[in-house]
């Protein structure tokens, strides 16, 4: 359903951005897929090992004349959907489905678009039993050398390893009200200050807004928050995505994977200048 | 996930109790109480037994220095990047003080270098729980990445002993990115056909589990070590239910198929040495 008519959340402070990123009225991954790719999307299911994780929505679609693989973390748009989607918290089988489809994309040298919106990988008994850590680790390793272009857009929350598992990409973009962090501000505040009510201070300290991250070179682009009825916004987003894929499709496998390695290799290099 | 809050030193409570009841008449460093079976052990006996309880075989935590001595041949360890030290790059409140305190206990969260293991030259990285519970910051990621790059260039096998509460939240997104950076370096080492062995020690959790700890060709763990992505307390809070017995122990993770073997500390060095030789290292 259209989500554009609610009052916009105030986004002056870091914590207000966090709340905006979690706003249940904002567009989710399936909305982006619908507005950018319409009827061309064919959903593909399952990790071929255990089950189909509905927190991850994935498939093929046409970006103009180019087939692309799309992998999104889906939170759900109403209570029923949110239950089905496990509130966008993926299990290991979700990350393994994502990796299966990335390897499939590599086989056909088809670009991969990841849409990330998660508070984190699911922390639960089944997830641990089935190797949540191993699933994420494998994605990080395999994505680094995936021989096809990968672009990740954070469209809401980017929660820690569960977000990073779909964000080892050639470029990472964020919506203006998206956040990306190693830990939730509530978790950080309760561990450090034994008081989750201090989440606003933690949010500021963690430097987790799109503007913070762009400021120190962690992401390549900030995208204006689109509204459901703003088709021209989706058209320009599509065009930006296509240009980025075209640029990276022109590279050799070696150039592409070297560029991706270098992108991450420089982060936190000691005495580098990427610090705010 | 940054989860090191739940991994408080296991014997903290016991130490306080000892002060009150048992130790007015002996220097307290002479004795150590096993947190598992409560036996009082002579510290020298415990240390001679590789920091393993002589009664119930509980594996105490070891410092990086002790573990390097355990695994490498005498005087063979050549440390690399010792000068890299953590900085408060995000100006995170309270982090300077934490770093200052940590630096008094250990050099860094990981020590890397080359050493020989029964004569086989190996790149060895050993994490240190004494430094902010081995949490992974940018220096941790940088040192491990450099270790893998050095090993790839010099065609050395890599052995990493992990102990970590996860990514270090005081370095925000930069510490999260170390998971990707280190994984990239592991992949290049792997693609060069070189061997990587991980030894998971208590506790190995969070961002370290979800990156290089789980990326070894061969993954070993010490008995009863906590091996987890999300720690038990986080899961209990989410699930609001009791966890199964022995959940997330090395033995549990072995049974679930995510590690190759549980190896008692006394057998670690010979086991690693055999594995290295089976992969053709140390033959020239």
Image (cartoon, rainbow, N blue to C red):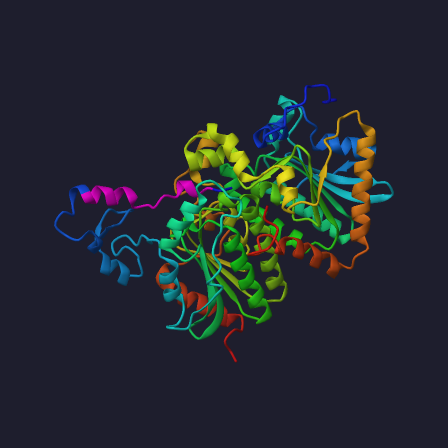
Q: Position of residue B38 (x, y in %)?
A: 24, 46
Q: Is residue B225 visible?
A: no
- Left or right: B106 as drawn, with respect to A95: left
Quarter of the image holding residue A24? top right
Quarter of the image holding residue B270? bottom left
* Up-down relation of residue B261 to residue B89 (above or below): below
Q: Position of residue B86 (x, y in %)?
A: 48, 53
Residue in the foreground of this view, choosing between B75 and B250: B75
Q: Position of residue B31 (x, y in %)?
A: 21, 53
Question: Which residue is at 24% across, 42% downward?
Answer: B16
* Up-down relation of residue A220 to residue A34 (above or below): below
* Up-down relation of residue B216 to residue A63 (above or below): below
Q: Position of residue B250 (x, y in %)?
A: 43, 50
Residue in the foreground of this view, choosing between B175 and B192: B175
Give the residues drawn in magenta, as a range.
Answer: B3-19
| Principal secondary structure, stretch drawn in magenta | helix
Q: Residue furthest right?
A: A65
- Asked if the stretch drawn in magenta spans residue B27, the answer is no
- Left or right: B43 as drawn, with respect to A149: left
Residue in the foreground of this view, choosing between B223 and A192: A192
């Amino acid at each position: 359903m259209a989500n554009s008519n609610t009052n916009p959340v105030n986004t002056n402070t870091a914590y207000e951005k966090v709340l905006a990123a979690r706003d249940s009225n904002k567009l989710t991954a399936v909305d982006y897929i619908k507005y950018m790719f319409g009827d061309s999307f064919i959903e593909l299911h399952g990790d071929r090992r255990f089950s189909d994780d509905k927190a991850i929505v994935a498939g093929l679609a046409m970006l103009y004349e180019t087939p692309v693989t799309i992998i999104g973390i889906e939170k759900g748009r109403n209570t029923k959907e949110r239950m089905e989607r496990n509130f966008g918290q993926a299990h290991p089988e979700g990350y393994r489905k994502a990796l299966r489809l990335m390897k499939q994309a590599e086989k056909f040298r088809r670009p991969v678009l990841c849409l990330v919106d998660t508070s984190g990988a699911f922390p639960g008994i089944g997830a641990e039993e089935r190797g949540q850590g191993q699933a994420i680790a494998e994605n990080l390793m395999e994505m680094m050398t995936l021989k096809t272009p990968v672009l990740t857009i954070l469209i809401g929350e980017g929660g820690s390893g569960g977000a990073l598992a779909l964000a080892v990409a050639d470029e990472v973009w964020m919506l203006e009200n998206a956040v990306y962090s190693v830990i939730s501000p509530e978790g950080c505040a309760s561990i450090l200050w034994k008081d989750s009510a201090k989440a606003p201070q933690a949010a500021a300290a963690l430097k987790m807004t799109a503007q913070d991250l762009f400021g120190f070179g962690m992401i390549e682009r900030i995208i204006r928050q689109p509204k459901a009825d703003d088709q021209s916004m989706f058209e320009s987003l599509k065009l930006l995505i296509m240009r980025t894929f075209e640029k990276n499709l022109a590279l050799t496998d070696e150039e592409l994977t070297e560029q991706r390695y270098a992108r991450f290799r420089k982060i936190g290099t000691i005495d580098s200048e990427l610090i705010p | 996930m940054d989860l090191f809050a739940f991994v408080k030193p296991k014997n903290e409570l016991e130490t306080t109790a000892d002060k009150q009841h048992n130790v007015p008449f002996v220097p307290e460093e002479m004795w150590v109480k096993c947190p598992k079976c409560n036996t009082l052990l002579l510290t020298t006996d415990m240390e001679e037994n590789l920091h393993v309880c002589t009664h119930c075989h509980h594996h105490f935590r070891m410092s990086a220095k002790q573990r390097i001595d355990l695994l490498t041949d005498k005087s063979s360890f050549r440390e690399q990047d010792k000068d890299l030290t953590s900085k408060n790059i995000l100006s995170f409140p309270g982090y300077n003080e934490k770093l200052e305190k940590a630096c008094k206990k250990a050099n860094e969260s990981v020590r890397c270098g080359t050493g020989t293991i029964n004569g086989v030259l190996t790149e060895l990285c050993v994490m240190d729980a004494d430094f902010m519970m081995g949490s992974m910051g940018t220096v941790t990621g940088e040192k491990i990445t450099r270790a893998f790059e050095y090993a790839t260039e010099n065609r050395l096998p890599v052995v990493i002993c992990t102990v970590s509460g996860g990514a270090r939240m005081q370095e925000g997104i930069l510490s999260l990115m170390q998971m990707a950076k280190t994984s990239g370096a592991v992949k290049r080492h792997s693609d060069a056909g070189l061997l990587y062995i991980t030894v998971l020690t208590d506790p190995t959790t969070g961002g370290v589990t979800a990156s290089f700890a789980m990326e070894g060709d061969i993954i070993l763990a010490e008995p009863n070590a906590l091996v987890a992505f999300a720690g038990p307390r986080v899961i209990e809070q989410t699930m609001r239910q009791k966890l199964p017995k022995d959940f997330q122990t090395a033995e549990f993770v072995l049974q679930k198929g995510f590690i190759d073997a549980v190896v008692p500390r006394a057998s670690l060095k010979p086991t690693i040495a055999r594995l290295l030789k089976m992969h053709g290292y140390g033959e020239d």
